[in-house]
Amino acid sequence: MTTVGLIANPLAGKDVRRFVSAASLNSDRSKIEILKRCVLGAIDAGAEKILLANDFRNLTIRAVEGLNLDGKIEEILFHPEGRRTDTTEAAKIFKEEGVKSVISLGGDGTQRDLVLGWRDVPLLPISTGTNNVFPFMVDPTVAGTAAGLIASNHLSIEEVSHQAKVIHVELPNGSKDLALVDVVLVDERLTGSRAVIKSDSVKQVLAAIANPACIGLASIAGRSNPVYFDDELAVSVICDPSATESVYAPIMPGSVSEVGIVDIKEVQLGESIELNGPGALAFDGERDFVMGENESAKATVLRNGPKVINPIFAIQTAAANKVFLRKRNS
Amino acid sequence: MDITDEILIDLYKRMVRVRLFEEEAGRLAESARLPGFLHLYVGEEAVAAGVCAALKNEDQITSTHRGHGHLLAKGGDFNRMMAELMGKATGYCNGKGGSMHICDLDLAMLGANGIVGAGVPIAVGAAFANRLTGNGLISVSFFGDGATNIGAFHEAANMAAALSLPMLFICENNEYAEYSPRHRTMAITDVIERAAAYGFPGAIVDGMDCVAVFEAASLAIEKIRSGEGPMMLECKTYRFYDHVGVKGTASNYRTDEEVEEMKKRDPLLVHEARLIESGVMSADSLQAIKDEIQKEVDKSVEFAEESPFPEVEEMLLDVYSKREPS
């Protein structure tokens, strides 16, 4: 069965950064419209089935209401609880079901949660978050079409995707975690509302993608020493408010801060980097783990992450292959 | 704002004050020692504690029909509160208001309110006064998700936005408007979308975590005080007891399993674990705080039971405030 998986994080783009930056609200309604366009694009491109990961807001279910696609829509057996782990659990089911491509709506944090459940997922991430380094800002009809072309074997995943890097982190308590864009050590003792807001709290940034044109903590690294998606490198930046050198970086939408820079180091894939406590570790922008005085985490960047489908390149490849030209019934 | 040990302990004490008082009130109501309706706030303590800890004492708040938590988290007096619940003359409203009309102007608590949504425009009025007098204060309205389906909310939100008033809207979204699940009464799931409709920012926070609420409220309050206009913080929370009383008359609108699942995220347990893990307090010292506050609660029951009922002649007093002609 040529199946596209579809999932959306209802809470993406709604956190406290709306109080302290120019971040906009990503409403449920707009997400539903995006999902609807993805579904229509995918079906048009030949997907035989859309597998919906329901969420606790019923966004995906509401998106297909009235589309008359009976027989082509299926829900996975899954009971969302309104937590981050919903995304991770849904990803595991997508993998078990053998879906050919997954469209995921959210920001960097959402894509990370998905990859925690299926590390090398064939993924077309669409940005509906606050910081969107990893997902694409793309018309959803185009994105749906690209995912549908892969599911229906009009395009091969190898042809139009690139495998992403992953920052693998071993935490002091022995557990493991990962990030797709950045792991940041901040001078905080609590996870609190999770978002990192104070630029002078940043102590260290380890970024697998450090694009100077991005928004978020990775922009500190991106504007210091760019490292792109395809580069076989990562970058570690040590920060201190009292440093003699600084960089101006938009750590939130519309919010450019001066961050003191002590040291910049390029990191090879496979090389391990220590992040030493005390402080909180933020994974893809969200504080998730607190380390004490003598604790440290070990981070290693490897290229073994999701196979990220570039929707524009996919559509262009399909057009070059004359995939969209069809014979008319006479 | 840096969250110090003192703030972490203060948040805990505020929540424990609400929890132990309310548990006692629930027991009294069950044993028919406390008359009238009782809408318990148990489960939602992190919201009142987190927001009130971020306010100045003089900042005004308005409350809901589930209002004990807001007054207690702002520093309300156990004796006067318990006496009011029992309808005694020593209570906050001289025993004539009861649970749903408790107020304390000395704490800038402008009143609980028996009418759903009716507290919101009162807070707008206070915010307007703050603006006109330039006193630097803000007003806060606590309201539920169901209240945002009421006209008063919409008029209040529009006026606060149009006049760019210093006001913080706190939506306590516990997913049920009395006995109706949110999805049966609203086509949206996040109330902050209504803030966006009126043109002011809103954000969602975990309402079961007092630190997350405190941090988010502090960020909003700083902006509002500096003149950026109203904001809305939506706290995703849950009430552990029924709409009315401990176990009400219409308990088939949600499952026991759902309630038990949410109790795993009890805001007190979440914060206790944090305090112990971070070495701020030991389990013994947490228990000592609880024991001390329980004693105060017990004393308030004695005080209330020993207090007299108001005289019949006082029935029509306090209906209107005394005001000299200007």
Image (cartoon, coloured by chain):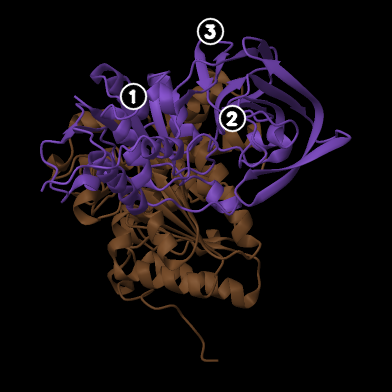
Depth-wise, is mark 1 or mark 2 nearer the camera?
1
User: Please, what secondary structure does the residue beneath circle 1 have?
Assistant: helix
Marks 2 and 3, the one that precedes in the sequence: 3
Colour chain A appears in: purple
Label 2 element class: loop
- Which residue occupies 59% across, 30% down? A190
Q: Nearer the viewer, residue A327 or B243?
A: A327
Vertical side of A115 occupied by B255: above or below: below
Residue type at tag 2: Leu
Query: Can residue B108 be seen?
Result: no
Mark 3, secondary structure of its residue: loop
The number of numbered discs placed on residues in the rendered structure image is 3
First reached walking from the N terminus: tag 1 or tag 2:
1
Q: Which chain is brown?
A: B
Q: Which residue of the protein is positioned furthest toward the front in this rendering? A: A330
Question: Which residue does the numbered mark 3 point to in the structure image?
Answer: A174
* Left or right placement of residue B213 versus residue A172 in this view: left
The chain containing the residue under callout 3 comes to A
Instruction: Please determine whether, in this image, residue B112 is positioned above or below residue A6.
Output: below
Q: Give the Cα distance between marks 1 and 2.
A: 29 Å
Please state the horizontal and vertical placement of residue B108, each as a whole percent of the image: 53, 62
Identify the disc placed on residue A190.
2
Q: Residue at x 47, y 27 (%)?
A: A112
- Which residue corresponds to mark 1? A91
Q: Residues within 10 Å of mark 3 (few under 14, many from 20)?
A: few
Q: Amino acid at mark 1?
A: Ala
